[in-house]
Amino acid sequence: MAAPEKPNGEWYSDGLQFECTQCGDCCSGAPGVVYVSDDEIEKIAAFIGRPGQGLPKEHLRLVGKVYSLTEDKKTGDCCYLKTGRNGSRTCSIYPVRPLQCRTWPFWTSNLEDRDAWDSAASSCPGMNKGNRYEFVQIEVRRTAESWEDLNT
């Protein structure tokens, strides 16, 4: 039996808490894919001082027909995750991070049921703490297809 395309939102109908701590845990570890649209590439490029030039080729890879940010081959860290002198890890493009990052942890895979949420929360210190997101706010994030969708 195939997994449902959308979760049964009943279990989170009273809302969920999340506040990004910028710990970098979701930006490192096992290899993954962080999809970026052409518009996001240009916003990131402008933010890092390369307006109209796109991103450095070592920061993008093609996955099928879509671009993804690259990772450090040794650590698995996103190319924009930076470690400070004190050991803190932060996203160096946080204000212009891709939609995929902006909508974490409200991904369909994390919202399938309470167990999926709790599993994700075991490695994310911002889940179940901080700001409360109401059901509608969660669904807006879960179904967003662009930054503009998050501003409605």
Image (cartoon, rainbow, N blue to C red):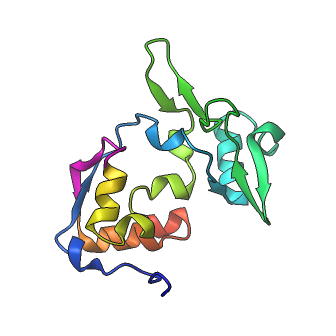
Q: Does residue 150 lie above or below 31 as drawn? A: below
Residue 8 coordinates in the image, percent (x, y): 31, 81
Residue that sits furthest to the front in the current view: 1
Residue 141 coordinates in the image, percent (x, y): 41, 66
Residue that sits furthest to the bottom in the current view: 1
Relative horizontal placement of residue 104, taking residue 18 as reference (left or right): right
**The one of 12 and 112 positioned closer to us in this rendering:** 112
Q: In the image, which residues are magenta?
A: 122-132
Relative horizontal placement of residue 4, taking residue 127 as reference (left or right): right
Is residue 77 part of the magenta span, yes or no?
Answer: no
Is residue 130 part of the magenta span, yes or no?
Answer: yes
Q: Does residue 78 lie above or below 66 as drawn? A: above
Relative horizontal placement of residue 80, taking residue 41 as reference (left or right): left
Q: Residue at x 53, y 62 (%)?
A: 147
Residue 63 coordinates in the image, percent (x, y): 76, 59
**The one of 115 and 14 positioned closer to us in this rendering:** 115
**Is any atom of residue 151 visible in this view?**
no
**The one of 26 and 103 positioned closer to us in this rendering:** 26
Q: Residue at x 23, y 80 (%)?
A: 10
Q: Residue at x 30, y 41 (%)?
A: 125
Quarter containing the C terminus: bottom left
Residue that sits furthest to the left in the current view: 14
Q: How many labels sit on residues?
A: 0
**Is any atom of residue 6 visible in this view?**
yes
Q: Residue at x 47, y 44 (%)?
A: 26
Residue 138 coordinates in the image, percent (x, y): 33, 68
